[in-house]
């Protein structure tokens, strides 16, 4: 009896092996075999909602924006990774990436020494953004931070964990004779347009994309103020993805893909599509 059972089990094992072999041979028609697919790692990519044109959700609720499109193209160049996109707030993105809830976050982030203590910055930056001053129309002649400081105008507060705070801080360090009055905000983002329009501040630092989506674009919340406030660019600043400190291998893989997309002109084409100009011309 035992011998018959052993024969039966052996026959079943041989049939199962044959079926597995058949499945394995069928799967080789794709780009990855079954053995390779087990090495594909799903990584969580957090993106900031409502930060058009950098990162946002479109009318269908799908992730969109320059950073998102770059990450999608990077994903295609990295067969061992599969990107999962998660829309969230700026604060949750920063805390989540730092704590490992997300593997990487994209939000058009600037480099700061403080952030470098918390996050892993890759070698290759992702894009660029225009930073500018939001001003009342009567102050449209203010074209630089130095002009703003010389006119002794008041600047809207900026959160210390906002990259824009570092931009102004570095300006003050480099221009001791014409410093701006920099105040720290209790919240990450304040309503710059409203502050300037109401006269609570003479000006505020803002990114061009945010100004366009809030003031310039038809249907935007402050489109009625489009003739009352202006945006005067003062710098083009590199932006970066923020990696969890343990994601060095992932960041290295990103570097290879990002460099390829910049070298072949894909990144320049995308940023022109989303911002209206090839900001990579100012990357140096």
Image (tube, rainbow, N blue to C red):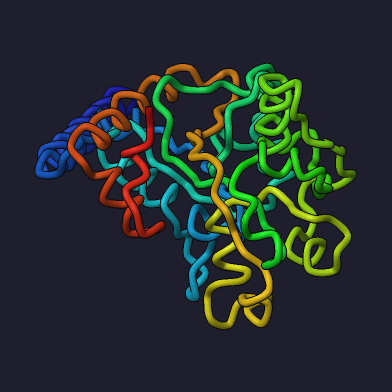
* Residue at image point 73% right, 26% down: 172
Residue 208 found in image quarter: bottom right
Would residue 252 appear left or right of 181 to someone viewing this image?
left
* Residue at image point 36% right, 59% down: 276
Would residue 240 appear left or right of 187 to someone viewing this image?
left
* Residue at image point 71% right, 44% down: 148
Residue 230 found in image quarter: bottom right
226 or 97, nearer to the observer: 226
* Residue at image point 74% right, 44% down: 91
Position above or below: 260 against 69:
above
**Residue 157 location (% of width, % of height):** 83, 45
Residue 124 found in image quarter: top left
How many callouts does the rendering have? 0
**Residue 188 location (% of width, % of height):** 78, 46
**Residue 78 location (% of width, % of height):** 29, 33
246 or 199, nearer to the observer: 199
Position above or below: 43 against 136:
above
- Quadrant for the C terminus in the image: top left
Residue 11 in sight from this viewpoint: no
Residue 110 in sight from this viewpoint: yes
- Quadrant for the N terminus in the image: top left
38 or 257, nearer to the observer: 257
**Residue 191 location (% of width, % of height):** 78, 60
55 or 98, nearer to the observer: 55
């Amino acid at each position: 009896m035992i011998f018959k059972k052993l024969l039966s089990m052996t026959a079943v094992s041989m049939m199962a092996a044959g079926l597995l072999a058949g499945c394995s041979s069928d799967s080789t028609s794709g780009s990855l075999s079954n053995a390779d697919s087990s090495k594909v790692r799903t990584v969580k990519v957090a993106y900031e909602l409502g930060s058009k044109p950098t990162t946002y959700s479109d009318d269908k609720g799908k992730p969109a924006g320059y950073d998102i499109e770059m990450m999608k193209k990077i994903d295609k160049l990295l067969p061992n990774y599969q990107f999962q996109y998660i829309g969230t707030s700026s604060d949750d993105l920063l805390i989540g990436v730092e704590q490992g809830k997300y593997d990487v976050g994209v939000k058009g982030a600037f480099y700061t020494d403080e952030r470098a203590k918390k996050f892993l910055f890759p070698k290759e930056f992702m894009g660029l953004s225009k930073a500018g001053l939001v001003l009342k129309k009567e102050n449209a002649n203010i074209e630089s931070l130095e002009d703003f400081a010389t006119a002794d105008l008041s600047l809207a507060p900026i959160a210390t964990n906002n990259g824009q705070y570092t931009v102004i801080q570095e300006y003050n360090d480099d221009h001791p004779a014409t410093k701006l009055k920099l105040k720290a905000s209790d919240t990450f983002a304040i309503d710059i347009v409203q502050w300037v329009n109401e006269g609570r501040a003479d000006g505020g630092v803002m990114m061009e994309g945010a100004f366009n989506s809030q003031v310039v674009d038809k249907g935007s919340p402050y489109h009625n103020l489009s003739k009352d406030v202006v945006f005067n660019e003062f710098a083009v600043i590199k932006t970066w993805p923020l990696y969890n400190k343990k994601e060095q291998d992932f960041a290295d893989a990103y570097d290879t893909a990002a460099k390829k997309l910049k070298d072949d002109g894909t990144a320049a084409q995308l940023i022109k599509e989303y911002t209206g100009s090839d900001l990579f011309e100012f990357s140096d």
